[in-house]
Amino acid sequence: MASNHTWKFFRAGGFDQVRMDTGADLMAIEELDQKLWVALACPTTGLEFDANTLALIDTDKDGRIRAPELIAAVKWAGACLKSPDDLVKSAPELPLSAINDATPEGKQLLASARQILANLGKKNATVITIEDTANTAKIFSQTQFNGDGIVPADSAEDEATKATINDMIDCLGPETDHSGKPGVSQAKVDEFFAAAQAYSDWWKQAETDSTILPFGASTAAAAATFKALKAKVDDYFTRCRLAAFDPRAANALNPEEKDYLVFAAKDLTPASSEIASFPLAQVGAGNPLPLKEGLNPAWSGAMANLETAIVRPLFNDKTFITESDWAVITAKFAPSETWTSGKAGALVEKLGLERVREILGGNCKETITALVARDKALEPEFSAIAEVERLVRYQRDLYKLTNNFVSFRDFYGRKDKAIFQAGTLYLDQRSCELCLSVEDAGKHGIMAGLSGTYLAYCDLARKGSGEKMQIVAAFTNGDSDNLMVGRNGIFYDRKGRDWDATISKLIQNPISIRQAFWSPYKKVARMIQEQIAKRAATADQAANARLAQRVEKVEEAAAKGTAPAPEPAKKIDTGMIAALGVGAAGIGGMVGGLLTGFLNLKALMPLGILAIILLISGPAMIMAWLKLRKRNLGPILDANGWAVNAKARINVPFGASLTRVAVLPPGAQRDLKDPFAEKKRPWGLYFTILVIILLILGWGFGKFDRILSNLSPKITSSWVIYNKLPPDGDSTPTETKPPTEQKK
């Protein structure tokens, strides 16, 4: 898309970023090539940004803000304001005069804003805030109808309708009105009256068919007794049939003596489970079921109910029932069971049949339906109230979001923290400001490890409230010598609350070139320390073993009553001495050669020292430099759900600003006397001895002859005369007389 807008860019992080300075810049955002956007998507969680505003921008409710959604939000907010420059101000309150009432939508927004303020008792207010729009319960507390299609009981004018609405809420549960009151919607009205009609019709079946309620109003209680005893009575008569089929089965079908022994020693009650498992009565061929005498004590109460509620109305005063009697009783309850299984309208059963038919007999359904329609008719007017909140939030938040989405102005500007920065971690005399909230450190580290940044994942906890969370902190300055899993620090979130922080995982990458410079020497020192410790441990083990052997020999000698044998004298290994001599000579020759070559550099010796240092530290520094050049914010954010569209680099100077190393404040006074300081070594004396050794070696190798010759010709001549050598350097000695004798 061609753009007629003149854009301004600034360079930060190694790439060009667009400046959003005016309302015109915001309104032209759709024309900006998205290849120039720093990010194309961001999550709606884990950000230091108003979650309600993000939810409004996220129109498809997928938990992510994408470029088209941000563009739509900016375009809508700009069109609803007289001047888009109001978006740049990011004010927490919206002046009513700023709303663009030249459009139908703007007029509705202005009217709704005034209605909100009037409902809140601020009729003469000229500005509206987020707090005003968010308090919907207070906004609608004085209104009976608010456009949400839900009517509370007090919206009805007569008591019968109010009572019916309360009954509906009691049976179906409430729906919350904008005012915060419980109410019902049209869907609930339809559901309630359908259930009421079904319940009434279901009872009509029983009222027109006498077989459904064989015991009249007592049928429900009788049916409950029948249902409780049916399985046990069927069991009894089945056992009696088996006894009639085979008399040998009678003993096996009744409890044996050993069955009683299991619980005979216990304290028994009629409700004991062991007793309840026995048959209702003594099983025998053709035996009837007694109703009073000879019953299992665990079932005597239920059998008494059976006799009173069912047997007596059907068979008068019988004291037992036969299997045929039980078949008659079962047949009596068959229609009732069928009717009960087809129960309809159970939702309103708690009201009772009489109340249900009272409601159906009136005109409450029509009255409540009219109330819902009346409330629903106001939906356009009151839905604009939500749009007022949206506009107030957009005016306050859209500009900040844009400067953390289209560009990373807040992050690279260092005046304000970016929305993805969760707070500051203080650990190892450093403060790390690039800290992000993470949900899964393991999953996050897979992608974030590609950033080339030294990352420390920390578990956070606030013991007072029990809150927990995880963060990842980028260490971009200092060194990593004291960073290890398990170290503790303090994390301050954006609200200023402090959290206990413990390192749980590290992703190691170069932090600085300075650290890379010293790393070879530290590795050598660490290796030497490890080797010394290993050798010392080995020597200690060997000494302990020898001591143990010596003690064992002494104990054996003491047991035998003899003196311990003396240790054999150690022989001098001449071969070993010779080998050591050869080795020492070789090492001395190598050192001498290196020293000779070094001294031959003469005035270039400082460059030689520098070359040696570069030879040792250079490779590590080069590797660190190459990695630090590639250090990138993108993978860290991508692992959190962002879609970063640029190579957002974190170079060395910028990294130093993100991780501050402890320094003394200006003007601070220091007392350098440390009572516990280690004793200083005489490094000056060591240096002097080293210089003397170098001079002696140089003299011995004749490296200073020419220098001395140039400085003192007379000394050289005297040396030549003394050694009887010709001045031209001839090696043949000649007799040379002193100058006085030559003159004579």
Image (tube, rainbow, N blue to C red):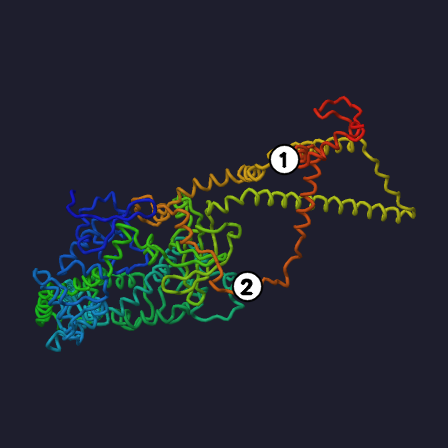
Q: Secondary structure at mark 2?
A: loop
Q: Quadrant of the C terminus?
A: top right
Q: Are marks 2 and 1 in contact (CB under 8 Å)?
A: no
Image coords of residue 325 (percent x, y): 29, 63
Residue at image point 28% right, 50% down: 407
Q: Earlier in the sequence, mark 2 or mark 1?
A: 1
- Compared to residue 608, the image places residue 143 above or below, namely below
Tell whether 212 sits left or right of 241. left
State which quadrant residue 385 falls in. Answer: bottom left
Q: Amino acid type of disc 1?
A: Leu
- The label on residue 683 is none
| Residue 215 visible in this rendered orientation of the protein | no
Q: Residue furthest bottom?
A: 159
Image coords of residue 536 (percent x, y): 69, 46
Q: Amino acid type of disc 2?
A: Arg
Q: Secondary structure at mark 1?
A: helix
Which of 415/686 is in front?
686
**Mark 2 = which residue?**
670
Q: Residues within 10 Å of mark 2 (few under 14, many from 20)?
A: few
Which of 116/252 is in front?
116
Tell whether 703 sits left or right of 123. right
Image coords of residue 510 (percent x, y): 46, 45
Q: Residues within 10 Å of mark 1 (few under 14, many from 20)?
A: some
- Compared to residue 590, the image places residue 516 above or below, namely below
| Residue 513 visible in this rendered orientation of the protein | yes
Q: How many numbered marks does the figure carry?
A: 2
- The label on residue 599 is 1
Q: Nearer the viewer, mark 2 or mark 1?
A: 1
Image coords of residue 420 (percent x, y): 34, 54
